[in-house]
Structures are given as structure tokens and as C-alpha cells.
Amino acid sequence: MVHKILAEVTARIAARSEAGRTRYLRRIEAAASQTPRRRALGCANQAHGFAACAPGDKANLRAGDGPSLGIVTAYNDMLSAHQPYERFPELIRAAAREAGGVAMVAGGVPAMCDGVTQGEAGMELSLFSRDVIALATAVALSHQTFDAAVYLGICDKIVPGLVIGALSFGHLPSVFIPAGPMTSGLPNDEKSRIRQLYAEGKVSRDELLEAEAKSYHGPGTCTFYGTANTNQMLMEIMGLHLPGAAFINPNTPLRDALTHEAAKRALAMTALGNDYTPIGLILDERAFANAVVGLHATGGSTNHTLHLVAMAAAGGITLTWDDFADLATITPLLCHIYPSGKADVNHFHAAGGTGFVIRELLEDGLLHEDVRTVAGTGLAAYAREPRLSADNRVTWVPGAEKTGDETVLRGTKNPFQPTGGLAVLDGVLGRAVMKISAVAPERHIIEAPAKIFHSQEEVQAAFKAGALNQDFVAVVRFQGPKAIGMPELHKLMPPLGVLQDKGFRVALVTDGRMSGASGKVPSAIHVTPEAAEGGAIALIEEGDIIRLDAVAGTLEVKVPPEIWVTRQPAEADLTASHSGVGRELFAAFRNAVSSADSGASIFMGNTFMGQNA
């Protein structure tokens, strides 16, 4: 039996989405084909499509009835999480041939590393890269020669962008294929400790670099539970991965076998057979409600309060922060993975992983079980774990019934906290999001005078000058999507963490974002309306008392109303952030982007892919 509030929220999403979802489903129904897609192309078009193929593949595409599988890849070998994808196309081609089909790389999409750009000018392109990836995915699939697609992507903006692009081609069966996390290196809490020591001038740059290199040391996803690994959890709980695929390490026999199996499964779901399962039908309102529950239950990345809204809109579904807030009230926090705890995702996986979380939530009626997935109908299949048979085939066995480590993973009867890992805050300053799973309960309420900054560099300079040794709320504004692209402000965490550890009551209020790796400092982020739009955050003055209350879900400023209404919004010269490192090319994005609570997307301003016309 589904929990009453989950049922109510899902029904509410369906009702508000009815018109847009109906238009979307009609569109993908019209695009579906029960004959190979290439048959609709002219002879010259088809010849271009198979000109460089291997002889057997060319013969199949020229005359056969076998399906054609498009590979959309975010491979590059600078990004550790995506470096393993170099080998995947050949694995997928071999699996496709075994299944009587053909696989080709349809196109590549960009994949920037937020770890490299953190605190640098390139970070101002990071969020916009999600929508660039969606556009690039559409270009890759626009040849209209594929019967299904697989998507190779893991990291922060890459998976959401691929999902948005895939939903534009929602008539195609689609499987997302992960590459897995790197093996555990220097513990994340030790890395964080050394970063704070460096901020205090107590360790050298060489010592800091050594710690970072021991933490980020090989192929695979960073091991903390940030946006990249939250993506992988979501792809499982939404039914787009094969069960248990998310957290198998790269370049292992099981990882390769899962990739082989994923390609075969994609071809088995085409409209040419009897198991047609397009992505546009998998990702319905139940799948998105499940995603929000999974986000809360695992203490996932705040970035998904943006991404899930934009992803849902691509399928004609209107998801709001109210849905996040209501589902938080019934979802227990089951995981303590860094930055919420000391463990990394490898420890989480060993303790029972995503399969254990899904089984626990299903048993309490906190997930919709009756959903479509790439593994068939029903989410219960995702409570299983993959194993490798003697002949190198994937088999699935029941997942863990008990947690292997209660410091990392717990069941619903003994959660780390009774409500979800994220909170939505409302008040005179607008709306904001706060990650509470990583913040000590005694810091869920902060009331202190405001200190105003218009960049994270200003905060760091004040810290180095010794001007922040007091209780305060850092108001870092003009960081929103229209202002400068809504960068992550993760480099604020070491200095603010130092001040918090000294005993000061500190917090952050910003219209920018924080990395999914950000943790212990109370942070009201994604404040909307943003300062560049004249939002209330632009009215705050130095010394105003700010109250951030995650318990009551409020974000207030204690200024008499008769004074507040007389204030004029502050202004900032943002020209330095509008050119250089390619930022001048994104002026159209800054002009078109929507607010944070509507996904911070360039597609949301007027009509989204024809759904909302």
C-alpha cells in the first residue's frame, strides 16, 4: 500500500501536468515506428549512415531487419568518472551484434569536471552545460536512424542533460550505462580536514595537493555522495539503469558484463519486438515522485532540486519545490555517506547499497512499485544485486535484508532522522533549499547579523584579513542563473568551516549553488527570486539580523516592515563575469534562463519542447 502522502503528492503532480503530459505522449506516440527507423530515410541518407561500418554491420543496416542502437557518449579522458567510457563503445557494439543488431556512436556531448573548475571562471558555465548537453543529445539523435539508444554519462550536469535530451526523443527505448566509482582513497573527512588546515595557513600547498591526489587517485567517480553519485542512485530508482549497476567499480569483469547486458536490453525493448518500452513512458509522475523520495532518503545533492524539475518538464511533467517539501515529511534519512557521514559510496554499496534502500522504502509504501523500468514492470526488481556467473553472464540475486553497517546505512525502523535530507525554506527573502542531512541538529537554526558579499573571493579575502571572527550570516548574492550562471560556491566551505569549528554561529545565504560535496555549514542556497532579478536578497543590508530555520522551514530578515518596504535593491557590476573563458558565448543563456525553482533552465522560459504551448 502506497503511503497516503506519496499518493496525494503524485496525484497532485499528475493533475497539474495533465495538459502538458497529454501533448507529450501524443508526440512520442506519433514518432514511434514498428519498422527500422532507417527504412524511412532515402537511399543516399542510408548510405551515409552506414558508409564507415564494419562489413557485417553494413550488410545488416543495408538490408536487414535488425535494430540499430545509438550510443550517446560523454567520454573524455580528463574527467576521471568518464575515462572508463573509452572502452564502452566496442563492448556495446559486440553485444549488439550478438543480439542481431548494430550499434554506432551517434554523437558525443561535453562533460566538464566541476572539481577542476571549482572556484574558477569556468564554473560559471557549469549549470548551463546541462542544457548544452541536452541540445547536443538532440543533435546526436536527429539523424532518425536509431531504434533505441544508450547513454554514457555519470557526472553532475551530464546525466540530467542526457535525460532531458533523451526525453525529447521519448519514443526511443533508452538505457543509461554507468561506469562506477573509483576505489576508495584518502578518506573524505581527512581530505576536508586538510583543506581547512590549508585555509588557516597551517599546512603547505604541497601537503594539500598530496591529500587531494590521494583522494582523487584513479578512474571512476569521486567517492563522496555528491551530485554525480546522486545521479547514479536516481537512475536506478527511476528505472533507467539495470538493477544494481550504479556502484560497481570500473574496469572489472562485472562492470563489463553489465555494460554488455545493458546494450542487449536496449535492443530488446524496441518497437520492432513485443516489449516496446520507450523512455517517455518510463519517466512518468510516479518515477519522479520516487526520485524525490530517493533523494531525501539518501541525503542526496541539492543540485537535484534544480535538475529533477528540468528533467520532469522535458516529459511534460510539472514538478515543484512544494512536492519536495511534502515528500520530505514522510521520508526517513537512511544513509550517512560523506558529506553527511564519514563513509564513501563504496562503503555504502558494501553495506547494502541502493538495493537495500529501495527494498526498505518499498516495504513502507514510500515508493511506487508499479512502474515501468528497463528491467521490466515493477520496482521490486531493483532490490536485487547483480552477480557474475561462471560463464561471465550477469545474474541477479536478492539484495541484503539487513544493513552491513549501521553507521552508514539503516532501515526505515531505525533511520538517522525521521525526515528527508533536504529542506525547502520560505519567507520574506523568498524560497531556498538547505541540505540538513550533513548539518548538526544544533545548527539547524541560525540567527545572526548579515555580512554582505558579491563574490566568494570577497568572503575569502575577509577571512584572511581576520574580519569574520564572530557570529554572522554570509549573504553572497548576485550568484544566480541570470547574474553569472549560478556557479557552485564550494570554496566557501573551508573558511566557513574553520569559523564554525572555532565556535561561531555561522551560516550562508546565497542565490548561487553549493557542490553536492558541501556539508556541515548551514546553507540556504538557490534563493529565488535572485538578486539580479531584484529579489529580496538584494534588499539585505550589512548588520540585518537573518534567521535561517530549517526546523520551521523559514528564511527571514528581522527588519521592521515600514523600513523594509522603503529599501531599493542593491546593484552589482557583473561585466567581469560576462566575458572570458567562453562566458561571452553564453549571454543568450543568461537572458533566457528560468528561476531556480523552475529548474534554472533555458528551456523553461516560454514553451518547453512544445509541451506547454
Image: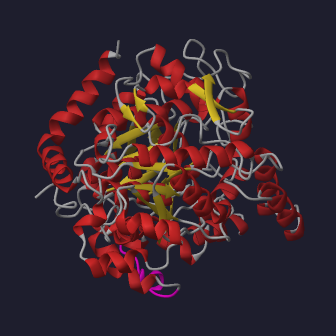
Q: Is residue 517 above or below residue 462?
A: above
Q: Is residue 613 above or below residue 234?
A: below
Q: Nearer the viewer, residue 200 or 25?
A: 25
> Could you tell whether 163 is left or right of 603 in the image?
right
Quarter residue 599 falls in: bottom left
Q: Is residue 171 above or below residue 567?
A: above
**Residue at x 42% of width, y 73% of height:** 484
In the rendered structure, does residue 275 fall within the stretch colored magenta?
no
> Could you tell whether 284 is left or right of 304 in the image?
left
**Residue at x 27% of width, y 78% of height:** 43
Q: Which residues are magenta?
A: 571-580
Assign the N terminus to one quadrant of the image. top left
Chief SS of the magenta region = loop
Q: Nearer the viewer, residue 330 or 162?
A: 162
Quarter residue 411 falls in: top right
In the rendered structure, does residue 572 fall within the stretch colored magenta?
yes
> Could you tell whether 208 is left or right of 364 in the image?
right
Using the rendered image of the protein, determine whether residue 261 is visible from the camera's viewpoint: yes
Q: What's the colour scheme?
A: secondary structure
> Could you tell whether 531 is left or right of 228 in the image?
left
Q: Position of residue 143 (x, y in %)?
A: 32, 71
Q: Is residue 379 above or below residue 162?
A: above
Q: Position of residue 606 (x, y in %)?
A: 17, 64
Q: Position of residue 377 (x, y in %)?
A: 38, 28
Using the rendered image of the protein, determine whether residue 448 is visible from the camera's viewpoint: no
Assign the C terminus to one quadrant of the image. bottom left
Q: Nearer the viewer, residue 340 or 317?
A: 317
Q: Position of residue 303 (x, y in %)?
A: 47, 51
